[in-house]
Amino acid sequence: MSLKNQIIELGKKEIPRKDFIRFCAVTAATLGLPASYTQIIAREIQKAAKRPPVIWMHFAECTGDTESFIRASNPNITDIVLDVVSVDYHETIMAPSGDAAHKSLEDSIHENKGKYIVIAEGAVPTKDNGIYLTIGSKTGLELATEVCKDAMAVLCVGTCSSFGGVQAQAPNPTGAKGVQEATGLPKEKFVHLPGCPHNVKNSVATIVHFLLFGKLPALDHDRRPLFAYGEKIHDHCPRRTHFENGEFVERFGDDGDRKKWCLYKVGCKGPETYHNCSKVLWNDGTNWPIGAGHGCNGCSERNFWDTMTPFYERLPDRTPFGSVSADKVAAVVGGATAAGIAVHAAIKAKKGRLGKGDEEDTKE
Amino acid sequence: MARVIIDPITRIEGHLRIEVEVENGKVKDAYSSGTLFRGFEVFMRGRDPRDAWYITQRACGVCTSVHAIASVKCLDHAFGVEIPENARIIRNLIMGAQYLHDHPVHFYHLHALDWVDVVSALSADPKKTAAFAANHNNSPKDSVNHFKKVKTRLKKFVDSGQLGPFANGYWGHPAYKLPPEANLMAVSHYLDALELQKKSAQLQAIFGGKNPHIQSVIPGGVTVGGILDVDHIASFKYLMQEIMSFIENVYIPDVLAVAPAYLDWGGIGAGHGNYLAWGLFPQDTKHHTKNQTFPDGVILNHDLSKVFDADTAKVAEHVKHSWYDGAEAKHPKDGKTDPKYTGLNDFKGIDLDKNEKYSWLKSPRYEDQVMEVGPLARVLVAYVRGNKDVQNLVNSTLKTLGAPATALFSTLGRTAARALETVFIGKEMEKWIDELIGNISKGNVDTANPIEIPDSGFGYGTTEAPRGALGHWIEIKNKKIENYQMVVPTTWNGSPRDNAGKRGPFEESLIGTPVADAKRPLEILRTIHSFDPCLACAVHVIDPQTNEIHKFKVA
């Protein structure tokens, strides 16, 4: 079919053609695919006869990932709910409660065995047989196992469902764990989209990738898609030049703060954090934490609540970073500029980029 | 007598179970249970106090930012730092954006399906719908053609056989009273509001960094010193206009268009009639200032002739019916928690004679009184305190609906108060942006003052979440968090019985609610949703002695 005909075809569909093509282009870009994929994505999505069933589960969570998800543009959230997928169970938006809600869940699992996608939000409390969360006389742990075992894929949105999140920080009073770890189900169908909350650009791109290729995108050792978690915040930070120049905010409200200098010394964890915030930003490109003058807190990393804290202390004083301190490096090399570069070099030497060996080979 | 258990209650934040006893078609008794426990205060202990706001914000992602604000106020107090004027304004703008987001989302996406029959909308005539809309609102979008498109889209969706979130709804329930045209209009606005809420989130992200979960506040001020520029302020003003246009031309008119069909709900769901507000939007930078756009106050027994000052020292938490050991009521800062889970038996019912425990929520009480918190409490307190704008909004709404003042104490009253305060807040925010511009043009660009963590200290901060009164308390020892405590809106509203056996606000407000069909308890959802429950942050534990969970018994 010619490009023109394709566009005409798409124009007959419910989503306004212009918006739909824009969505496909953005998705291709987020996934790191060539622009030529825009039309392929459009075609594949539109030809699905039955909208893929989605079951969204809430465990120990704050609903921040649901809130993040409904910020979707390209396609708009209304299009996702009405045209792209079938959200069969989602406690925050669904009409029925109680028994009628359970029926929706059971119907979808039964009718779509092995064909539904689970989107999981929140950690699963496991201590004391999981009593710290019950939904309709079942524990969260029982429900997680029941719902995920026959899923085609499980997308863990947010750091809680991925790794346990806020409630799992020491001393983890409820034994909260990520869904895969809590259920012990085979990890092959799980994908982790951590972040506090996760960025909807990444969940939508992952869903589209799955619908398009029939499998999960390439993942890292923590089962995070490389398209979103393959590079560090620091790699694309607009304040990077100030880091290289040794121009740092020393305290919030100082002159460097007003000049948008580097936030490294007031705690930015961008050099240690694999996430695409600095590229895709938040809320349709409105802003992002570093854009608002606050350091990155490393929220997409597995145990960031314990390893990235205190949030306002710079990294070299912390264990994940080794024993090299910025002050020591500065003392040896001398001069702020040199210090910045040397520290950066130290970081790279210590951690490096994600090595090939760390990746799981799930590429096409 | 029929016992009805609704678990989960959906279209809320978090995990809530409601059990009611129905006799002669009305609720005779009710029990509210929070069914998730996360243990926030346990893992707060020993951490850097500066991190408290970032951690506690994760108490809730729906009323995101409110815990951040309550917490930084608590830290400002504990650190003894006063924030710059600009920081106060920025924090208020961030908080205001939260209300412009949260309230419309509650009305359209969490509450509307209690009043609007989606299936009935399929039989609406688009022409009549446009006429109905023109009669009620000023939305430029609501044309015949637009409603035709919405109806076609809805029909296609239903015909697909995949009803998604609308499957198994209570469609056709006799308690739905709107004509098809009103239903179609409401469904159309449900979709419009779902798109609009992204704009309000963007509004918050301009100075909040991102949404959900802002990242731009700190003890001592805010971090946005680098972006107090024309670009950001102009974006804020522009987005405000777009959002306010929807609130004034669609949201408020929709509440007024739907209410006449449900005026009987102005006499249902009153509850105890005690209201508490800590107040919101400080207008100077002093800790715990009384100078707030929404004043603090306490109203008792539906009595609008008196309002008392609200005092945080008068709060005590009861645990007799909560899954914790002990029975003595304690002030939050002295509280103690030994989890003691005894389970719920769906077949037996809750046995109060045996002092059965049935919720992870504690029962906060104010001088032993049960208190309702939320938009209605704030609006009533502001009304009685003499705020002219709030008085005008309330009076004109009552007049339009031909409803008596007593109709405010109800399920409908809560929903109306929520809408009215949204428009009031939006108008105030427009003044604050101008104030900010004034400061900047005078050369005042301060956004944060220096801080030092005290070796030891105590602080507290109060504010109002969209769902109601919110307080944070901190105790610092050796520059670390020794004890951290939150008393949050839904702990007030969703609490179980207290030590004296008094029902919590959810429970009391359900008494007498009609239930036409016990298998489809739509009416119960109406009243529960009118409070806008938010359970994630409602369940908490404090343990100043140890950071371990104590032994518990499983019955």
Image (cartoon, rainbow, N blue to C red):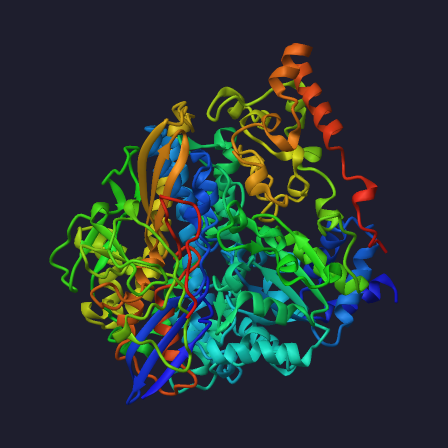
Q: Where residue B53 sits in the image (x, y, percent)?
A: 44, 41
Q: Is residue B450 left or right of residue B315?
A: right
Q: Compared to B505, does B94 lie above or below?
A: above
Residue at 43% in and 26% down: B445
Farthest residue to the right: give it.
Answer: A1
Q: Where residue A166 sits in the image (x, y, percent)?
A: 52, 48
Q: Is residue B356 left or right of residue A253?
A: left
Farthest residue to the left: give it.
Answer: B305
User: Residue B366 versus residue B81: which sits nearer the camera?
Assistant: B366
Residue at 22% in and 72% down: B403
Q: Quadrant of the N terminus of chain B?
A: bottom left
Q: Is residue A19 left or right of residue B410?
A: right
Q: Quadrant of residue B508?
A: bottom left
User: Residue A345 versus residue A180: which sits nearer the camera?
Assistant: A180
Q: Compared to B153, does B139 lie above or below?
A: above
Q: Where residue B358 sits in the image (x, y, percent)?
A: 36, 68
User: Residue A196 versus residue B185: which sits nearer the camera?
Assistant: A196
Q: Where residue A81 sits in the image (x, y, percent)?
A: 61, 68
Q: Quadrant of residue B545?
A: top left
- Residue A36 visible, this angle: yes
- Residue A7 visible, this angle: no
Q: Quadrant of the C terminus of chain B?
A: bottom left
Total numbered labels placed on residues in the image: 0
